[in-house]
Amino acid sequence: MTGILDQAKQYFLGLQSGIIEQLEKLDGHRFAFDQWDRPEGGGGISRVIEAGALFERGGCNFSHVMGDKLPPSASAHRPELSGRRWEAMGVSLVLHPHNPYVPTVHMNVRLFMAFDGDHGHQDAIGWCGGGMDLTPYYGFEDDAKHFHQQCKNALDPFGTQWYPRFKRWCDEYFFLKHRKEARGIGGIFFDDLCDPGIEESFALTRSVGDSFLSAYVPIVEKRRKIDYGERERDFQAYRRGRYVEFNLVFDRGTLFGLQSQGRTESILMSMPPIVKWRYDWHPEPDSPEAALYQLIQARDWV
Amino acid sequence: MTGILDQAKQYFLGLQSGIIEQLEKLDGHRFAFDQWDRPEGGGGISRVIEAGALFERGGCNFSHVMGDKLPPSASAHRPELSGRRWEAMGVSLVLHPHNPYVPTVHMNVRLFMAFDGDHGHQDAIGWCGGGMDLTPYYGFEDDAKHFHQQCKNALDPFGTQWYPRFKRWCDEYFFLKHRKEARGIGGIFFDDLCDPGIEESFALTRSVGDSFLSAYVPIVEKRRKIDYGERERDFQAYRRGRYVEFNLVFDRGTLFGLQSQGRTESILMSMPPIVKWRYDWHPEPDSPEAALYQLIQARDWV
């Protein structure tokens, strides 16, 4: 099972580089390169952009972390593994564009391993997780369809059961219970994937990572030229508050990172650059802002 | 034990009115009045201000909520009460001024009751909690001393052991573990107070509530005329991000509210109006911004 960790490291680093190369072409500005070590073991490479031409703030991070005792947030569904030696590796991306017509996007692919302390790597258990989801402000049905179609295309070669399952999982996961509201138009989400075998699980996970650019870039190219003003920026800042609420209250990855002595600045690169909260605000009926609340109602997009 | 609930309701409503009256005089604008019912039982009165002359956003809420099963976040230190019928009542205040030289402040006083289902109010257990703490952006040692002195004055009539205990509890509670940083210059915090008897515990809690105005208003009056510009506003917006991180990741009151089907807009009135996140930002050495990081190091203020 050690082989898969080496293979995964090579894959994740290549994925990060490939994505950054394309995003830099799109934006015209460079992403900063920030390599860091984790005192408790491991480290990562954070690639971050702020005040770009297209992206107001965002990042695409690689990390490889490890520890002696698996924290509870990593193994909610695997209590028997809690406390074992572990390694986790993955790429995590969040992009917050300036233009409120260009949606915020999140993508993550990761591999987890838990080891039996007595027998070393021989008795390792591995599982994968990941997904991508889209959070529009002023959204378009066509974009939602395109994004979901790309998600489906990534998964179908591994069996047509996965897309409907991971699509539903995404709708359930990215749901703000205290608002009774979806975070966006969804996408796919999966975790604890090992049943098809770790090789197949990781191949599926790679396919998700490899599909990110074709899922997101065409939407950016289509919407980035739309004019906007203060009204749209204001609504975007307000809706970004929901993003903050979700990530800090509910997101397992964020909680795991903060619990496992992760690198705070890399974990919280998901936070938007400017956010506003307003008391008990509701959009005017039939306004473009009200349309978003319709668009994010869970439905079948493909 | 029913008597104390009636007495508490009268006290809390009076405290809210009295505080709002003074804050409206300070600001010159009115706080909106928003009465709400909670479908699961109880309700509250939220008094909220946005875009005031002094306060950019803030609120002072009364709530009285109840339920059949005490949620875990309410009884972390009292697992034996988890699942009991309960009532909670209190006043909670957060104020975010425009001027970065005027600190953000938080105050809360509350009474909790858990009942034995078989014997009704006769077998009730009650406890109190509360406190107040100050979060400066460009801070002053004099203000920290004044605020702590007022906290001490509120508690000393009930025994000189309380202030040092609740001051330390505040420093420990309002600490951002993932940043290794205090939220502000502290104040006092207490919970699960019932040992001196519920009458005495509630009298102490009232004394904290009654001291809020004398702790905060003189600081406002002293600092509200200081000039500021974009640099100060920017640092304030950045530091407000820490406030958001604390409240959404760590704050027991916020988590209890969101877990117990509380009124989201009233709970999240604590969120600042405009917040910014910036990647791995650090203040220039010896700058006024760097001074804050010195000021919030825990120390004895009185």
Image: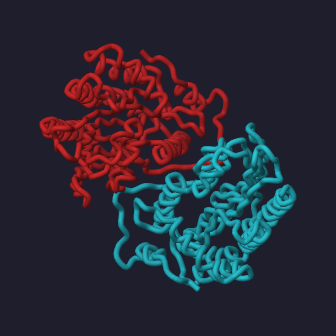
Chain colours: A red, B cyan
Q: Is residue A36 above or below residue A113?
A: below
- For the N terminus of chain A, the image quarter is top left
A35 lies left or right of A132? left
Q: Position of residue B244 (x, y in %)?
A: 52, 55
Q: Nearer the viewer, residue B52 or A204?
A: A204
Q: Residue at x 83, y 53 (%)?
A: B122
Q: Position of residue B140 (x, y in %)?
A: 54, 80
Q: Position of residue A74 (x, y in %)?
A: 36, 43
- For the C terminus of chain A, the image quarter is top left
Q: Residue at x 67, y 55 (%)?
A: B50
B211 lies left or right of A6? right
Is residue A140 shown to the viewer in this render? yes
Q: Residue at x 40, y 66 (%)?
A: B180
Q: Based on the displayed image, in which of its 4 quarters is residue B53 positioned?
A: bottom right
Is residue A10 shown to the viewer in this render? no
Q: How many marks?
A: 0
Q: Is residue A295 above or below residue A72?
A: above
Q: Based on the displayed image, in which of its 4 quarters is residue A123 positioned?
A: top left
Q: Position of residue A210 (x, y in %)?
A: 24, 29
Q: Residue at x 72, y 41 (%)?
A: B68
